[in-house]
Image (spheres, grey):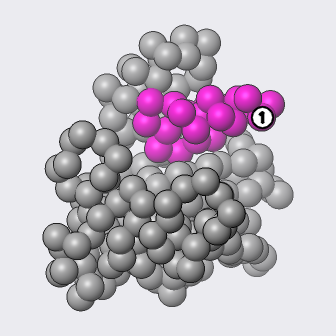
C-alpha cells in the first residue's frame, strides 16, 4: 500500500519494481488525477480520520512518503499507525519517510527556510514553513515538525518498532550544487515492523 499516494507517483514507482500496489489518499482530486494518469491502477479515497473500513486487504509492505509531515497530532498519528499495523501481514513492513526537524532550520538546494526564523523554536506538533525554490509557486509549504524521539514514541504506542533508521546524505561527487545536504540529513526513513508482544 502507498499511504498518502497523492497523484500516484510513488505508487507507480512501486509498480515498476514489481509490486501489486494499492494507493490511498484523503484528497479526492489527487485520487482522480492518479486514476487519469494510471487507469489500470488501484487508487482508493479514504476519510481524513484513517483507513479503517476502506480495505480488508493485508499488505506485505506499506510506504508512506511525507504523509505524516501533514498529520498534526500525536494521537492521530498513533491511531493511523495502529490502523496501518492492523493491515500488515505477520512479517510485513512499513517504510515511513518524513522530514527531519533540520529541514525547517537550514537552507537547501531546493528548499528555503530563511523567511521563517520561528521554525527554530518549533517543537513536535508545531506548524512550520518552508518554500520550495525550484518551482514557480513560492507560497510556503506548511508541515508539522516532529522529532526523532517523538516519532519513536508514536511507533511504540502504535505497536510498532523501528528495525532500521536511515538519514541519507548527498555525496560531494554528485552533479548538483548542494547547500547542506552533504552534512545534514533533511529526511529520515524509518523501517518498521510489528512490535514483539
- Occupied quadrant, residue 6: top left
Q: Residue at x 45, y 13 (%)?
A: 36
| Quarter of the N terminus within the rendering | top right
Q: Is residue 100 visible?
A: no
Give residue 50's position: percent from left, percent from top: 42, 49
- Occupied quadrant, residue 171: bottom right
- How crowded pointer 1 is (Cα within 10 Å; few <14, some 14-19, many 20+) is rated as few
Residue range of the region highlighted in magenta in the rendering: 1-23
Q: Residue at x 22, y 73 (%)?
A: 114
| Quarter of the C terminus within the rendering | bottom right
Q: Is residue 32 visible?
A: yes
Q: Residue at x 35, y 60 (%)?
A: 111
Give residue 140's position: percent from left, percent from top: 20, 56
Q: Nearer the viewer, residue 168 or 74?
A: 168
* Residue 134 falls left or right of residue 44: left
- Looking at the image, is 25 positioned above or below residue 142? above
* Residue 181 falls left or right of residue 87: left
* Residue 63 falls left or right of residue 36: right
Give residue 80's position: percent from left, percent from top: 47, 58
Q: Is residue 18 magenta?
A: yes
Q: Nearer the viewer, residue 151 or 14?
A: 14
* Residue 136 falls left or right of residue 27: left
Q: Nearer the viewer, residue 61 or 52?
A: 61
Q: Is residue 128 magenta?
A: no
The residue to which callout 1 is attached is 17
Secondary structure under badge 1? loop
Amino acid at each position: 500500500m502507498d499511504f498518502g499516494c497523492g497523484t500516484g507517483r510513488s505508487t507507480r514507482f512501486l509498480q515498476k519494481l514489481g509490486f501489486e500496489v494499492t494507493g490511498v489518499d484523503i484528497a479526492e482530486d489527487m485520487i482522480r488525477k492518479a486514476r487519469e494518469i494510471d487507469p489500470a491502477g488501484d487508487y482508493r479515497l479514504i476519510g481524513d480520520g484513517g483507513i479503517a473500513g476502506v480495505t480488508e486487504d493485508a499488505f506485505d509492505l506499506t510506504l508512506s512518503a511525507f504523509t505524516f509531515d501533514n498529520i498534526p497530532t500525536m494521537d492521530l498519528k498513533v491511531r493511523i499507525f495502529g490502523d496501518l499495523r492492523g493491515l500488515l501481514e505477520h512479517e510485513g513492513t512499513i517504510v515511513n519517510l518524513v522530514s527531519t526537524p533540520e529541514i525547517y532550520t537550514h537552507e537547501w538546494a531546493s528548499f528555503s527556510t530563511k523567511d521563517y526564523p520561528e521554525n527554530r523554536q518549533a517543537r513536535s506538533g508545531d506548524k512550520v514553513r518552508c518554500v520550495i525554490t525550484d518551482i514557480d509557486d513560492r507560497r510556503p509549504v506548511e508541515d508539522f515538525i516532529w522529532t526523532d524521539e517523538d516519532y519513536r514514541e508514536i511507533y511504540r504506542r502504535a505497536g510498532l518498532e523501528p528495525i532500521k533508521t536511515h538519514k541519507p546524505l548527498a555525496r560531494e561527487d554528485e552533479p548538483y550544487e548542494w547547500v547542506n545536504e552533504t552534512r545534514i540529513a533533511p529526511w529520515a526513513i524509518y523501517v518498521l515492523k510489528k512490535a514483539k508482544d
